[in-house]
Image (spheres, rainbow, N blue to C red):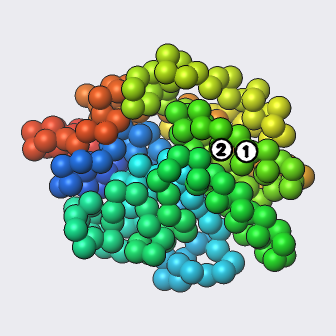
Amino acid sequence: MEQKKKELLQEAARNIRIGIIKGTHAAKSGHPGGSLSIADILAYLYFEEMNIDPQNPQDPDRDRFVLSKGHCAPALYSVLANRGYFPVEELTTLRKIGSRLQGHPDMTLTPGVDMSAGSLGLGISSAAGMALAGKLDGKDYRVYTVIGDGESEEGQVWEACMFAAHYKLDNLCVIVDWNGLQIDGPIAEVMNPAPHDKKLEAFGFHVISVDGHDLDQLAAAFAEAKTVKGKPTAIVATTVKGKGVSFMENKVNWHGAAPNDEQCAAALAELNA
C-alpha cells in the first residue's frame, strides 16, 4: 500500500478511536475495549474497501456491513460519522434518550446502519441472508460482517457459517475480531472456541489470518477475498482489546466500562499525541 494512502487510513482509525472515547465518556456507559480493537478494520472497510455513498445510504447496489458484535456500536457510529453519514458532534449523544445512536445499532434510526444488531449470532446470520439475497437478485454487492471471538461461542454463529458455505456465498466476508477477551475474562478460560481457522475451514470457508491492526495485511486479505469463488471467506484478525489507549489495552475490565473525566482526558491526549 502506498504510504500516503496508509497515512490517511491511520488518521481515519485514530479519529474513529477518538469518537469511541468521546461517545462512551459522554454516555457514561458502553463498550470501549472491543470497539477500539476493530477501529483499523472499520477504517479500511469504510474508507477504502466498500462501495458506499454516504449521500445515498440506501443505494440498492451498495456493499453491506453488519456489526454482529453489536455492543461495539461506538466503533460503528464513529466510522459512520467520520465517513460523512451524520455529524461527528452527534457521537456525544450516544445512549441518550431521543438520540439516533442507541446502545446497539438500529437500522431504523441511524443513517448507514444496514442491520440492527445486539443479540450475539444474529448479525452474521443476517449478513448471510443479505449475501444470498444478492445472489438471487443478480447483484454484485458484497456483504461484510464483524463477529467477536467471544460471540463465536454462540451456536447460531456456526449455523450461519454452515448456511453460508452450503449456498456458496462467495460475496460474504466474515471478519473475526480475535482480541482474546470477553466480558468474563480470557476466551481461552471462559469457553475456548479455538482453533478458529481450522473450524472455519471445516465449515467450508476460505480462511485468511492477519494482524488486525496492520493495514497492509488487511489490504492483502480483502483483495484475496474478492478472488475467492464458490465459498465464503473468513478473515481471522488478531487484535488488541482497547488498542490505541495504553491503559485500556488487554484489560478485560474495559469490555463494558466507560472512561471517567480523568481517563477520557488521558485517552484523548494519547490519541492526539
Q: Residue at x 25, y 39 (%)?
A: 257
Position of 90 relative to 60 (above/below):
above
Left/right placement of residue 240 relative to residue 271 reads right
Residue 203, image x, y percentages: 81, 37
* Mark 2, secondary structure of its residue: helix
Type of amino acid at the residue the image marks with label 1? Glu
Which quarter of the picture shows residue 253?
Answer: top left
Q: Position of residue 31 (x, y in %)?
A: 34, 44
**Residue appearing at x 59%, y 53% in the figure:** 122
Q: Kindly identify which residue carries mark 1.
A: 159
* Residue pictured at 13% horizontal, 41% vertical: 260
Q: Is residue 48 above or below residue 244?
A: below
Can you say whether 126 is above or below 109 in the image?
above
Q: Is residue 26 left or right of residue 240?
A: left
Name the image quarter holding the C terminus: top left
Q: Would residue 214 be seen by someone viewing this image from the given angle?
A: no
Q: Amino acid at mark 2?
A: Gln
Residue 194 placement (x, y as % from top left): 64, 23
Camera-side residue of 3 and 268: 268
| Residue holding disc 2 | 156
**Quadrant of residue 135 in the image?**
bottom right
Q: Nearer the viewer, residue 222 or 38?
A: 38
Q: Secondary structure at mark 1?
A: helix
Q: Is residue 82 above or below residue 230?
A: below
Please provide percent x and percent y for residue 97.
22, 68
